Amino acid sequence: MSQLYRITLLLLLLTGSMVDLRAQITEKPISGEFSNLRFEAFVQQVEAQTTYRFFYNPREVDSLIVDMKVDKQPLSTVLRQLFQGSKFGFAIDNQQRVYITVNRLIRTELPIGFFRRGNAETGSDSTLSAYMTETQKKRVEPEAKTYEIGKPTNPIRSGRATLSGLVRNVASGEPIVGAAVYIENPRIGTVTDQFGHYSFTLPRGRHDLKLRSIGLKDTRRRIILYADGKFDVEMEDDVIALKEVVIEAEKDANISGVQMGQERVDIKSIKQVPTALGEADLLRVIQTLPGVKTVGESSTGLNVRGGATDQNLILYNDAPIYNSSHLFGFFSAFNPDMIKSAELYKSAIPSRFGGRLSSVLDVQTRDGNKKKFVGSGGIGLLTGRITVEGPILKDKTSFIAGFRSTYSDWLLRQLSAKSFQNSRASFYDINLHVTHDANEKNTFYLTGYWSQDRFRLNSDTTYGYRNQTATLKWKHIITNKLYSVFTGSYSGYEYGVSSEKQPLSAYQLDFSINQSQFKADFNFYPTNQHALDFGLSSIYYKLSPGNFQPKGEKSLIIPDVVPSEKGVESAVYIGDRFDVSPKLTISAGLRYSFYSYLGPNTVYQYATGVPKSVNTIVDTLTYGNNKAIATYHGPEYRVALRYALSPTASVKASFNRTRQYIQMLSNTTVISPTDIWKLSDQSIRPQVGDQFALGFYKNNQTNTIETSVEAYYKTMSNLLDYRSGASLILNHHIETDVVNAEGMAYGIEFLVKKLTGKLNGWISYTYARTLLRSTNINNTEIINSGSYYPSSYDKPHDVTMVGNYKINRRFSLSLNFTYSTGRPITLPVSKYILDNSPRLLYSERNQYRIPDYYRADFAMNIEGNHKIKKLAHSSWTISVYNLLGRHNAYSVYFKSELGRINGYQLSIFGEPIPSVTYNFRF
């Protein structure tokens, strides 16, 4: 019986399976004028007019263009003409499935040994599925099935229904962010959010649901939509895809989406861009984007569209990070192996975000593998890292944990110079994230982060600082159209400076900030034309501005404690994205924030009409615990619109107002461990910023090359600048050393990105100005006679080029080039003699500039072999930072030596810095 079955099956295959194309005599003819179409678009048109279904790897055909006119010709004739002289081949089976291959033939006969394989007792071997891999079976079976959503009716009722669900990675079970989910007839679609969730409304009936995401295989599901329902989909990794995409973009999202001023950075780009000392660095990649600047080498502080470094809200799974750098700014605080996605908002900031003036950087971690235990890591010249992940309860609960540290202390001790041997520098960070799917409607997320830095530079003074965050989130699906996310988070940052070499003067100086937050966010999709989000949040701040204490029993240091500060910031918001027509989309939102500065505290009142100083205090007021000392509130408007000029071009405009109730006090050009955060109070008002932006976006026909131009104008009020010689540490009257200022920033940003192919990357140019003007009413506090002056981070010209070239599947090259105008400084313009001592007379503030900055970096990535089944996979990264060895000026300073004033230039990296990193995963 088994042998008879085999013979029958063979006859069926010989008569009905894949056959040579010359034998196809029942093919349905196709017609059409295919003018300069990407192959994928050609396929869509053919599938729309026929029952053919194509199967191919999109990465293999991304460079294939169809330019031909066809009139009632068989598909095989068209494909043969299209592929003539190329590496492409094809086959068509009796079910009108078309298979496209590259440099390989599809087998059209059964494998040798088919009739000798197995016996009558092994029924599974008597079918063709016995010769398919598990992966092939998993892929073919879901695409061949038809899924019914809702209770079946006959006939199918007219009207519309809402389809929602989760999109996950089939191998790891992790949600896929930013996946496009759509149908083509009618053209309706959406994009998954940060939880992999999607929801949209479709006509009831049969649909071919399609999903697409970068680095994953295109996925299709046949569905019959009877009523509202939930439909989860799993997508496969595209294992042979090149690591080619640098800034993630979902197809034409830059054209069709209303959001402007947004950049989504993919983890692959983070690992491709060359960096100092070979460590993959998220913030270094962010700094290559248009509109983002930094004041110089070894600074991870971001200046976004004219904003100061404290005007950026950096979130790590919804918890703020107050110091985002390690080891003097050489490394960012984020372990690259933990990151799932990072989104930077420079304008049109969504109404759910608030608290900072200039930008939001939203970093999300991966959820961890729900299927099996895996790991990854790397060993570099200065750092090592390890990440492990896996299921706690398979398919329900997963974890991912990462540890990163440096062994720079060991390296410093190996150097011959005593100044290095007497120095110490180290850091570590620990990450833990747990995801639990309680059921289809409830998911819980728990995140913890801890980092610590400690260093001493050839002196007896030790610096240390640490970040701590904890986040608990609960995502609850209320209906197919409405879901909620409740979040509780804690963020802490503290630093300490100590010296104990001289017992009599040994001291310990500490500063800390603690923030606790609760928020509730809701997303509602009433129709495909509207997407509403609304919610509320509340933050409790507690700061210790300075605690100076003796260290050791012999110390004679007099204690000094600056009173602690407390404040509460709350907000409610609502926003709506409204698709007025296929060409016009409007997004409008309103956020209203409230803030109170709370006691206990002592408030000083100063005489009017004279500069504030200790000598002009006229009264002292004392406030009890939790009493409101100062209260501020106001609206924050968020408006954006997009108008499509064509399928490949659009214009966008936006306006947003933001408020900031906490600011950083620093008179250094870079983020320093001794910077102090200060709450708005009765003297220091909250900062307010308004930004107008206008952009034009154009893609080529295949959406593989993106171009954009964005212009902006921003005004800022209640900014802080400082008097010359201001002392910020342990200052009990900080309001006497700050100067009120207002600012304006304007600029234009150009960006060209190539997303696919062996050569990819981006080139950007930014022209931008940031100017400040003091607004104090007292003439003695006026800077530059009340005229506008450049801010310390005003750098008009900025050019960045990032290129990646894939030689083959194992070898790739990366090149990064950066040029920018030198930052402003204040220089001595003359000298005079006072009391027989030379003194300097300085120019107006920031009237000169240090030399221009430019740098080239290079990296080579060497992958291991591509065998899928092996114990561990590895790769090497060989990089050179500052390839040209340029002595870029970090700062310019002056010293009085033997009666003369001499100027000096300090460079951080004056030579090429080579590095080697070994990466592995298992």
Image: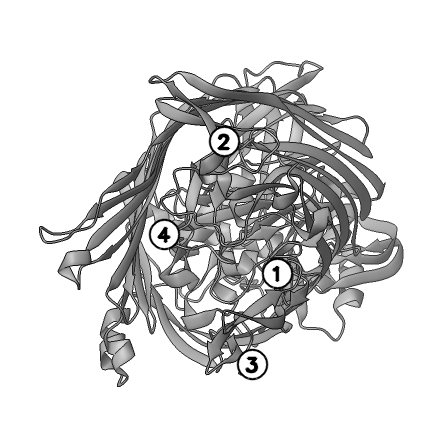
The label on residue 680 is: 2
Type of residue at label 4? Asp
Residue at the spot of label 3: 886
Where is residue 30 shown, x and y percent of the image? 83, 50
Task: Classify mark 2: residues with Cα within 10 Å, few (<14), some (14-19) or many (20+).
Answer: many
**133, above or below 382, in the image:** above
Residue at the spot of label 1: 59
**593, above or below 394, in the image:** above
Type of residue at label 3? Arg
Considering only order in the chain, which callout, 1 or 3, is on the residue closer to the N terminus?
A: 1
Considering only order in the chain, which callout, 2 or 1, is on the residue closer to the N terminus?
A: 1
Type of residue at label 2? Ser
**180, above or below 2, in the image:** above
Q: CA distance from mark 4 to mark 2?
A: 75 Å
Name the residue at the front extreme: 835
In the image: residue 803, left or right of residue 912:
right
Nearer the viewer's eye, disc 4 or disc 2? Answer: 2
Considering only order in the chain, which callout, 4 or 3, is on the residue closer to the N terminus?
A: 4
Residue at 56% x, 83% y is 884
Considering only order in the chain, which callout, 2 or 4, is on the residue closer to the N terminus?
A: 4
- Say what secondary structure mark 2 lies in: loop
In what quadrant of the picture does the C terminus appear? bottom left
Residue at the spot of label 4: 125
